[in-house]
Amino acid sequence: MPLTADDRLAILDVLARANWAADAKDVEELADHYAPDGQISGAFQAQAGDGFRGDLRRIFDGEGSLKRHLLANPVIEGDGDRAQVTWLMPVFEGETEPALVATCKVTDELRRENGRWLIVHHRVEIDPSMTIDVGQGG
């Protein structure tokens, strides 16, 4: 069964809310958008399970000041209860100076569980042209 327009909107809402939680460095809110087996890979690492929240805290600590994560050019594919979204994420400094600090390609895999779309795998690839200092990614 193809994804409906409601599915696509719900998926975009999850990703936008995850970005807002990342901006706020809100570990609990961000973790709430991940499936129990959810993980982050690529430029940043957060493993599924008991250590996930600690990994998120470490990522946020590495970012230092406020960062603004934007969702751009999403392409959504999938059917039934699974989806993949490929999108671009420009990251802006939000506290110390007006600056673009990273551009990234993101691939998210999502799964519908109990009527809710949740992130299963969030892969961040920072563009090679960027020389940044956002924790372990730069």
Image: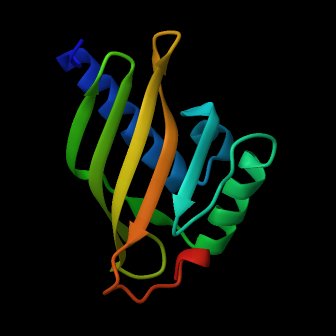
Q: Quadrant of residue 78?
A: top left
- Quadrant of residue 126 within the rendered picture: bottom left
Name the residue located 65 percent from the left edge and 54 percent from the top edge.
46
- Across and down, in percent, residue 96 comes to 48, 80
Residue at the (42%, 39%) spot, across then down: 109
- Using the image, determine if residue 118 lies above or below residue 131: above
Classify 26 as above or below 124.
above
Kindly give the residue lying farthest to the right in the view shown: 50
Which residue is found at the position 30% from the left and 42% from the top?
A: 85
| Res. 12 visible in picture | yes
Between 58 and 93, the one lying in front of the other is: 58
User: Horizontal placement of 55 versus 124: left or right?
Assistant: right
Q: Residue at x 67, y 39 (%)?
A: 28
State the colouring used for the structure image.
Answer: rainbow
- Picture layout, residue 134 above or below residue 118: below
Q: Is residue 95 left or right of residue 44?
A: left
Q: Position of residue 5 (x, y in %)?
A: 18, 19
Specify the quadrant of the image occupied by residue 32. top right
Q: Where is residue 1 shown, x and y percent of the image?
A: 24, 11
Residue 24 showing in the rendered view: no
The front one of 37 and 17 is 37
The picture places residue 20, in percent across and down from the top left corner, at: 45, 46
Q: How many marks?
A: 0
